[in-house]
Amino acid sequence: MSEAIIENKKRSVILAVGAAVLLIGAGVAAYWAIANRRFAPEVPLAGNLLPKNALMAISFSTDIEEWEKLRSFGTKESQALFDKNLAGLRDRLLAANGYDYEKDIEPWVGSEVTMAFLPPGNIEQALDGIDSADPGAGGLQNPGKSSVVMVLPIDKPPLAQEAWAKNQGADRAKWVDSTYKGIDIKQMQNADSQANYAFSLLGKRFLAIANSTEAIERTIDTYLGEPSLVAVKGYEEAWQQLDSGRSFARLYINIPVAAAVVASNREGVSTAALIESQQHQGFATAIALEPEGIRFRSRAWLRADRQSSQSPEENKVATMPKRLPAETLIMMSGANLQKLWEDYAEVALSSPIAPLKPQWLRTAIQTTTKLDLEKDLLSWMAGEFSLALIPASSEGESKYGFGLTAIVEASDRRAGEATLEKLDGIMKSQYKYEVEEGQVGDLPVTNWIADNGVLILTHGWLEGNIFFFTLGAPVASSIAPSPKAPLAKSQGFATTASKELDSQNGSFFLDVERAINQNLLPGLRLPPEQKTMVNGINAIGVTAATSDERSTSYETFVWLKKAGQPQELPPPGGS
């Protein structure tokens, strides 16, 4: 079980790294959607214009100095690959349609740009009236295509007008004019790519661009007063907390809409059931560039119809990074293992795409150990905990490259000791392990030894009520009775740890340089381009804290290497 959890965690980290790279790479050709009407001043302008059921909105600064700072991170190889992808995206979205960013857009565009994804219309119907999706059926039939809306603010209208008119006379483009609710729309069909683009000026101050006329019309509806993202419960409050005015980029995800899109693309998954299983309404992130890397400040909040059992009192995680050694490759920690499982089991019970079914795990533990997961194990684990991968010592002999380590603050040590005694007996009688008493330093421990003499597992108690076990490589001496150099004081952890969330209820740390780039996790293999990008990362740290009864804050820091001053991007068409 534990190895599967760690494997899923490794995959999640790589997906997160890849997603961050994709988000950054998409920014140079994105456009900002804004309307000329009264806006809520506390939120990003896109929130006032984009439809309420937008799946995702990604905003980026147009500050050239900020982009130069971003391009200076990484290694020389990752820097070159990033620039190549950036130039290629620019050419596909701009040069292929006769535009040059520096000449035609940069002189008049505003300070920030946004790209938004709108779900198909029938998914919106399912969201507006859940009864329109049959709870017993699979995903929506023929859900249709999602749309992309790209709009930009106009700081200098005359220059924008020149760019607007530039290609309208080109032989390769066919223009069709139409009007929707009194607002002009121009649709361009490029004879080379067969791509259709729709354009509209909103209030003569903002230009909206989309890959379909329907998407432009939905944006105009919002501009004229239909509900926008600002109408989403919790949206304004999230940005009031996150937006410090120094963000390089912003990201917003509408979680129920995302669930509906997932259901529409998976056979056997009920759209209604998947939407209803979502506890959260939204996830917002403000992204800032700092001298050592990229910081993501995020907030997730519950749907209005969901009850909360969380409390800021849960923010008490503090000791686990001090109990692990500096050489730790991966670490995750939390405030209460028992409650974490209870919360997950409740959500997974109603979610058709939960990665681990609670009943499966209960049955597996009952079958193999004769123990009840909740009554015998988790009942005494209502304290702070951590899971970690620690590399094997070069001085020791082991067929494993690392040891899986768990540390739990027991809420009932007496119950824990009784359970462990029962478990030791089962391992000895049923699985024929040698169960022997031993010592790590002056600390008494129990060892499970296989019939070939290989040490499989060590468990024991640190001071007070702190229980630990190690599985795989014999790494108990690195944590018991205490590490010589703790993870909390290592450069990687200190650099990536939260600077703002002093009270925490969970954290995650990955030493990318050693675990991935130096191949200390030998089973992990990445495609060449992804490997090149990951080589530019030193470490990643994530911190979580309960903000209030209905929202959770996260802070993620990606510590990056520095490649130095980037070269100029190749000219349009040269990539």
Image (cartoon, helix red, strand yellow):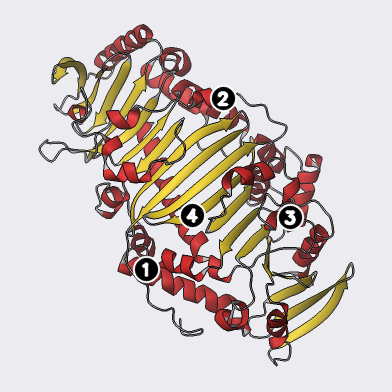
Circle 2 residue: 311
User: Mark 3 falls on what kind of element?
Assistant: helix
Residue 93: percent from the left, percent from the top? Answer: 59, 75
Q: CA distance from mark 2 to mark 4?
A: 28 Å
Circle nearer the N terminus (3, 4) = 3
Q: What amino acid is labelled 2 in the image?
A: Ser
State the image quarter where residue 31 is shown.
Answer: bottom right
The circle drawn on residue 48 is 3
User: Mark 1 falls on what kind of element?
Assistant: helix
Question: Viewer-proximal residue, 384 or 108?
Answer: 108
Compared with 240, 45 (above or below) is below
Circle 1 residue: 79
Residue 292: percent from the left, percent from the top? Answer: 36, 55
Question: Viewer-proximal residue, 107 or 299?
Answer: 107
Q: What amino acid is labelled 3 in the image?
A: Asn
Q: CA distance from mark 1 to mark 4?
A: 19 Å
User: Mark 2 falls on what kind of element?
Assistant: loop
Q: Are marks 2 and 4 in contact (CB under 8 Å)?
A: no
Residue shown at the point (46%, 30%) measured from the top left: 503
Q: Can you tell which of label 3 and label 1 is closer to the viewer?
A: 3
**Residue neighbourhood size for the residue with mark 4, other residues' Cα within 10 Å, grouped as few (<14), some (14–19), many (≥20):** some
Image-based side of 308 in relation to 518, left or right: right
The number of discs equals 4
Q: Are marks 3 and 2 in contact (CB under 8 Å)?
A: no
Q: CA distance from mark 3 to mark 2?
A: 31 Å
State the image quarter where residue 354 is shown.
Answer: top right
Q: Are marks 3 and 1 in contact (CB under 8 Å)?
A: no
Residue shown at the point (33%, 54%) measured from the top left: 525
